[in-house]
Amino acid sequence: MNRLLRTICFAIALLAVIGPPGVQAAPRYMFKIASLAPDGSVWARHFQEFQNEVTAKSNGEIGFKFYMGGVMGDDRAMYRKMRIGQLQGGGFTMTGISETVPDFRVMAIPFLFKTYAEVDRVAEGLFPHFQKAFLEKDMVLLAMTEVGFVYTMSGEPVSTVTQLRASKCWAPENDPLSRSFLEDMGVTPIPLSIPDVLSSLQTGMINTVFNGFYGSIVLQWFTRTKYITDTPFGYAYGGLVFSKSAFDKLPPQHAAMMEAAAKKHFAGLLADTRRSNEEALATLKNNGIRLVPTEKETLRQLLAVRDQKTVPRLIGTAFSKEIYEAATRLLADFRAKPPVGTTGK
């Protein structure tokens, strides 16, 4: 009888430890992550692939809960929720997170890049600087994300400065780069958060926006625009960011594994985003969107205003002199000695 009782007690204790069949233990480290990226988009897919690898390699010790499509609010709201521990990370746009880490916006200077090869070289060179700047704000930057080159998309053709000034032009809320540049060009931009852009296009509050080809389809902005100016206005990107306090709880081997997984999957995101933009351009053309050329004189005027007015007054406020000099030095070096075999596409 005593042996039977001991066997029953042991069985009960074992069940208490392992749980009933088919029930997995809760992750020891749970990360709630939010993003404006729509569910089902290329960005959401790479978040999911990143999650799958990290969860598998940690044997279920690391878990994630993703909130896509802005259900946790815009970048500002996401950051506030990170500060109070409601979220442990986010996929942030450059515009939103640069309110907290200003140097992160330096690559979004209008008309800075001509090719993705230039983007990749500067991003690689600046990444350690960005990581340090995020750590100073108690955040961990694991990877950069990408929207890609963004173009002027409008209801009427915009190929001259006069046409730009006549437009009802959007500027991302809290983006001093776009807003200041447009103001220096004599434009009065209308600042809006990304979730408010489509409804503002629909009501006619604005008729000119900036987005990548794929982004304009995913966000449905293309339904309210008819023309795309064929010179990129700038480069749009973001970051996969974690709360330092949450990330620091991970054992070193888990932290290293998560960093490696982020590097792998979000490098793949760049390739997929660029391919998606190429495919999206064909879709836009099939839907009647027309490309309009930028006049050479217009481009000369835009660059002159950027270099002589906008950038000089933003250095030290929108971004530091040090990060600007580092970015322009990397870009100049690359243009002087492009890698063998680089096409710049």
Image: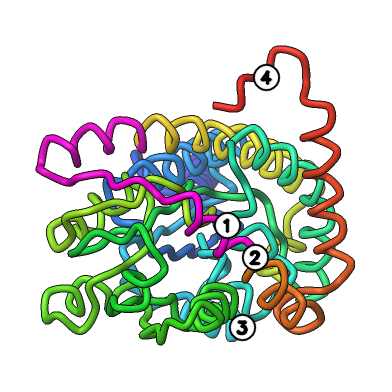
5, above or below 335, in the image: below
> Mark 3 Cα within 10 Å, few/some/many (few <14, many 20+)?
some
> Mark 1 Cα within 10 Å, few/some/many (few <14, many 20+)?
few
280, above or below 2, in the image: above
Element on which disc 4 rests = loop
3 vs 1, front mark: 1
Query: Residue 59: x and y, percent?
Result: 58, 37
The circle on residue 300 is: 1
> Mark 2 Cα within 10 Å, few/some/many (few <14, many 20+)?
few
> Mark 4 Cα within 10 Å, few/some/many (few <14, many 20+)?
few
Query: Residue 4: x and y, percent?
Result: 47, 41
User: Which amino acid, mark 2?
Assistant: Ala
Q: Residue at point 48% right, 59% down?
A: 298
Mark 1 or mark 4, which has the lower sequence index?
1
Magenta residues, start to end: 277-303
- Asked whether the beta carbons under mark 2 and mark 4 sit within 8 Å of each other, the answer is no
Element on which disc 2 rests = helix
Viewed as shown, does residue 2 lie left or right of 40?
A: right
Residue 294 or residue 340, whichever sits in front? 294
Residue 26 or residue 156, whichever sits in front? 156
> On the image, numbered disc 4 is attached to which residue?
342
Q: Residue at point 45% right, 37% down?
A: 49
Residue 302 magenta: yes
**In which quadrant of the rendered view does residue 238 lie?**
bottom right
Mark 2 or mark 4, which has the lower sequence index?
2
User: Which amino acid, mark 1?
Assistant: Arg
> On the image, numbered disc 2 is attached to which residue?
304
